[in-house]
Image (cartoon, coloured by chain):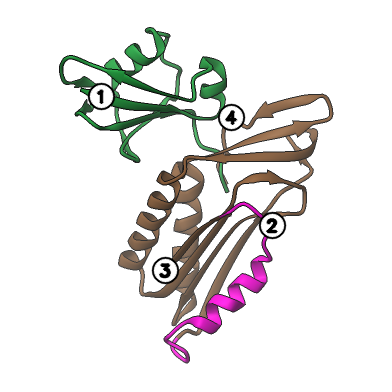
Chain colours: A brown, B green
Amino acid sequence: MVVQIRNEPFDAYAEVQIMQDSLEQQGKFGATSVFVGTMRDFNEDESVQSMFLEHYPGMTEKYLTQISQQAKQNWPIIDSLIIHRVGQIEPGDSIVLVAVWAAHRAAAYDANRYLMEELKSRAPFWKKEQLNDGQRWVEKNTPS
Amino acid sequence: MSIQVKFFASLREQLQIDEIQIQADQAGTVMQVWQQATNSQAIPANLLCAINMEYVGLEHAVVDGDEVAFFPPVTGG
C-alpha cells in the first residue's frame, strides 16, 4: 500500500510498472486496474492555462492511507498505489494515479472506484485555475 | 489552553489568515474556535472542519494542543 504526494510531474504508467515489479506476491495478481486523472485545458466552458493544487500536508496522506486500508478490508486486493500531484500543474500533466492489484477483476475495479470516489469527495486538495483573464478556485468536483 | 488554527484555499484568502494560535480559558467547541479565530465572521455554507487531521463537526469539543483546520469543499483528483 503506497500513498505519495508529488510536487513534480510524474509518469503514471511508469509508476504502475515500477510498483508492479516490486510487489512481493508475483504470480498472484491477475488484474490491475489503473485510473489516471489528467489536467484538461478547459473547465466550465472556459479555457484553462494552468492550475495550482493546494493541499493540507499531513491530513492528505493520513486520509489517503485510511481509505487504502479500508479498501483492503472491503475487497480481496493484493495492493494499491495512490499518487497525487500538488503545486503548479499544466494541461496534459497527470494529477492523480490510483492503481489496484487483485487476483480477479471485480475487486480491482471496485476498489479502484471506491478509492477515487473517496479521494474526490474527502481528500483535502483544492484546485485554483489560471484563466486567460484571472484566477478562480474550483468550487466543487463533478459528481462523476 | 492553546489551539493551533489553520485555514486553507479560498477560505484562507477570504479571511487573510493562514494559521493562528488562539488561547482559551476553558474547553470549547470547534464553533467557538471559529468565532475566536475569525472575530465571529459568518460561517460559510459547506464549511469543512478537522481536528488533528480528522473530519469533525462544528459541535465537536477541542482540547489543549489540538490543531483545528477550516476549509471549503475539496476539489482534488
Front position in the image: A102 or A87: A87
Q: Mark 2 lies on which chain?
A: A
Kindly report the distance in space between the C-alpha atoms of the residues bearing marks 3 and 4. 30 Å
Q: Residue furthest right?
A: A132
For badge 4, the amino acid type reads: Glu
Kindly report the distance in space between the C-alpha atoms of the residues bearing marks 2 and 4. 24 Å
Q: Does the magenta stretch include residue A21?
A: yes
Q: Is residue B15 above or below residue A9?
A: above
For badge 2, the amino acid type reads: Pro
Q: What element carries label 2?
A: loop
Could you say where residue A98 lies in the image, as x and y percent from the top left? 54, 62
For badge 1, the amino acid type reads: Ser
Tell whether label 2 touches label 1 (CB within 8 Å). Answer: no
Q: Which chain carries label 3?
A: A
> For mark 3, what is the residue?
A1
How crowded pointer 4 is (Cα within 10 Å; few <14, some 14-19, many 20+) is rated as some
Q: Which mark is residue A9?
A: 2
Instruction: Same chain for labels 2 and 4? Say yes or no.
Output: yes
Instruction: Same chain for labels 1 and 2? Say yes or no.
Output: no
Instruction: Locate the N terminus of chain A and report the quarter of the image it occupies.
Output: bottom left
Q: Which mark is residue B2?
A: 1
